[in-house]
Image: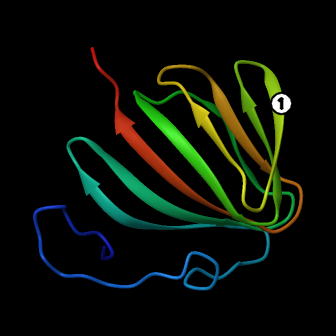
Amino acid sequence: MSKNKNSNQTETEIINLKTDLQYQEKSVVSRMLMKNPGGSVTLFAFGEGEGLSEHTAPFDALVVCTEGEAEIGIAGKIYPLKEGESITMPANIPHSVQAVTDFKMLLVMIKSKG
């Protein structure tokens, strides 16, 4: 996978999910690793206390915590997530992310049927 490459391109790159994206104080940093019409894969680093407010997306999503801890809100319910854990988020359901500590996650979004 390579930064901002479509899946039909052949460039390959090894990515370390814990070290290739650095925290920035009071910020959310992201790096898109792959994107095509079927979805995307993005690495995020959240400074402690930072987050993404509640929103919806037309994609089913898998969040994989690679470092730290966060609270993932899905349809009004809060789920604690820590390193090594993952959670799924259905398409078109309100969700949010709030970093409890410095927090890194891999977000895999897949286009929903319909």
Q: Amino acid at mark 1?
A: Ile
Against 2, is 59 above or below?
Answer: above
All told, the count of numbered labels is 1
Q: Is residue 8 left or right of residue 37?
A: left
Residue 64: image location, x then y, percent: 62, 54
**Residue at the location (39% across, 85% down)?**
14
Q: Residue at x 50, y 38 (%)?
A: 61
Query: What residue occupies the far front of the structure in this picture?
Result: 84
Q: Is residue 10 left or right of residue 2?
A: left
Relative to 100, say whether 24 is above or below: below
Q: Please name the residue shown 52% across and 52% down the image.
A: 107
Give the quarter of the figure containing the N terminus: bottom left
- What x and y, as percent, mark residue 36? 22, 51
Quadrant for residue 2, please give it. bottom left
Question: Which residue is found at the position 89% from the left and 55% from the top?
Answer: 100
Mark 1 lies on residue: 78
Q: Position of residue 73 (x, y in %)?
A: 75, 32
Mark 1 Cα shell of 10 Å, populated few (<14), some (14-19), many (≥20): some
Foreground pick, 25 / 34: 34
Q: Position of residue 10 (x, y in %)?
A: 12, 76
Image quadrant assignment for residue 109: top left
Say which of 76 and 8 sits in front: 8
Q: What quarter of the picture does the C terminus occupy?
A: top left
From this viewpoint, which residue is outermost toward the top? 114
Relative to residue 64, is residue 47 drawn left or right? right
In the displayed structure image, the side of residue 10 where residue 16 appears, left or right: right
Against 91, is 39 above or below? below
Q: How is the image coloured?
A: rainbow
Q: Under tag 1, what secondary structure?
A: strand
